[in-house]
Image (tube, rainbow, N blue to C red):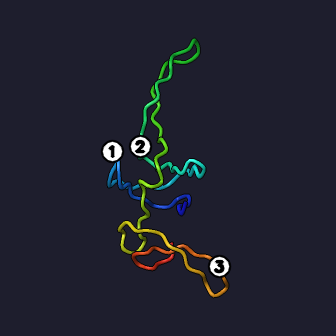
Amino acid sequence: MKFKLNDEVVIIAGKDKNKTGKIIKILRKQNKVVVEKINLRTKHIKKTAEKAGEKIQYEAPLSASNAMLIDPKTKKRTRIGYTTTEKGKKQRIAKLSKENV
């Protein structure tokens, strides 16, 4: 998976198509990401003797294939590639603008 935490992504499929947000959690084994304020779900919690019942909204994971990185230069969605520096270090680049991500 080519995503990192705090990457700005746009959703390309599903009910939240064309919405943007920041990645707050990555589930690498499941190939899923959790994006801020995207794919919101509601969980109903039953009341107990100590606490009243409540509804909680949370961000559910979505497939990493449904998200694309936003190019920092052009602000459009782009794929991610890799290059190596002179020192041999691997860097992520945006395919659209060849800019470091």
The answer to which of 60 and 75 lies nearer the viewer is: 60
Label 2 secondary element: loop
Q: Do tag 2 and tag 3 residues touch (Cβ < 8 Å)?
A: no
Residue 52: x and y, percent? 50, 18
Q: Tag 2: Cα neighbours inside 10 Å, few (<14), some, or many (≥20)? A: some
Label 3 secondary element: loop
Q: Earlier in the sequence, mark 2 or mark 1?
A: 1
Q: Residue visible at 48% across and 19% down?
A: 53
| Tag 3: amino acid | Lys
Residue 65: x and y, percent? 44, 55
Q: Which residue is most to the bottom?
A: 86
Marks 2/3: CA distance?
Answer: 35 Å
The residue that disc 2 covers is 39
Q: Do tag 1 and tag 3 residues touch (Cβ < 8 Å)?
A: no
Q: Residue visible at 36% across and 69% down?
A: 75
Q: Tag 3: Cα neighbours inside 10 Å, few (<14), some, or many (≥20)? A: few
The residue that disc 3 covers is 89
Residue 90: x and y, percent? 61, 76
Quarter of the image with the N terminus is bottom right
Marks counted in the figure total 3
The residue that disc 1 covers is 15
Q: Do tag 2 and tag 1 residues touch (Cβ < 8 Å)?
A: yes
> Going by the image, does 3 lie left or right of 19?
right
Q: Earlier in the sequence, mark 1 or mark 3?
A: 1
| Tag 2: amino acid | Asn
Q: Residue visible at 41% across and 53% down?
A: 66
Residue 83: x and y, percent? 55, 79
| Tag 1: amino acid | Lys
Q: Tag 1: Cα neighbours inside 10 Å, few (<14), some, or many (≥20)? A: few
Q: Which residue is most to the right?
A: 87
Q: Residue visible at 37% across and 66% down?
A: 77
Q: Earlier in the sequence, mark 2 or mark 3?
A: 2
